[in-house]
Image (cartoon, rainbow, N blue to C red):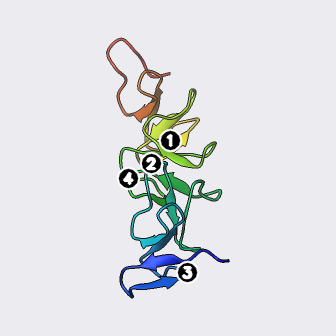
Amino acid sequence: NSTRYADDSSRICQLNCNSPFYADNITRTCTTKCTSIPQYYGHNITRLCIQYCPPFTFGDPVLNLCVLKCSDGYYGDNSTWTCVTKCSFGNFGDNTTNMCVGTCPASAKYFGDKLTSLCVKTCQIGLYAD
């Protein structure tokens, strides 16, 4: 007994969902946006809604998709393979790549701000670039 998904476009129960749809096991429908409670992400290769994105892709909670680059204001955390608004301790959000990094890019003269966990060009008042 294979799971079938309700496809609104064809009005048929399908084994697989075709682009731009993703197979959602919770609702058993072909959907353009995977469910967000609990958080699921659309995987472009399998066309499935999945809870964890494969390595080197990040679960983007804005788009509900597995992406190579997170939406603006989010940073790819390669310990969880999710897009986060604040990087884990000791890492900084790099707005040039939308990634969490251990060291901010020196080529662009960025510095890690431990208060905001972001790479910044100018340190906050009372703090100095090292």
Kindly identify the amino acid type of the residue bearing the numbered disc 3: Asn
Q: Provide residue 9's location: percent of width, then percent of height.
A: 36, 84
- Mark sitting earlier along the chain (1/2): 2
Residue at 45% from the left image edge and 34% from the top image edge: 86
Q: How far is mark 3 from mark 1, CA to CA? A: 43 Å
Q: Which residue is mark 2?
A: 37
Secondary structure under the numbered disc 3 in the rendered image? loop
Q: How far is mark 3 from mark 2, CA to CA? A: 22 Å
- Disc 2 vs disc 4: which is toward the camera? 2
Secondary structure under the numbered disc 2 in the rendered image? loop
Residue at 59% from the left image edge and 57% from the top image edge: 53
Q: Which residue is mark 3?
A: 16
Q: How far is mark 1 from mark 4, CA to CA? A: 26 Å
- Disc 1 vs disc 2: which is toward the camera? 2
- Mark sitting earlier along the chain (1/4): 4
* Label 1 crowd bin: few (<14), some (14–19), many (20+), radius 10 Å: some
Q: Is residue 68 visible?
A: no
Residue at 41% from the left image edge and 77% from the top image edge: 20
Q: Provide residue 45's location: percent of width, then percent of height.
A: 57, 74
Q: Which residue is mark 1?
A: 105
Residue that lies at the very extreme toward the front in this rendered image: 1
Q: How far is mark 3 from mark 4, CA to CA? A: 24 Å
Instruction: Say whether residue 82 is left or right of residue 8.
Output: right
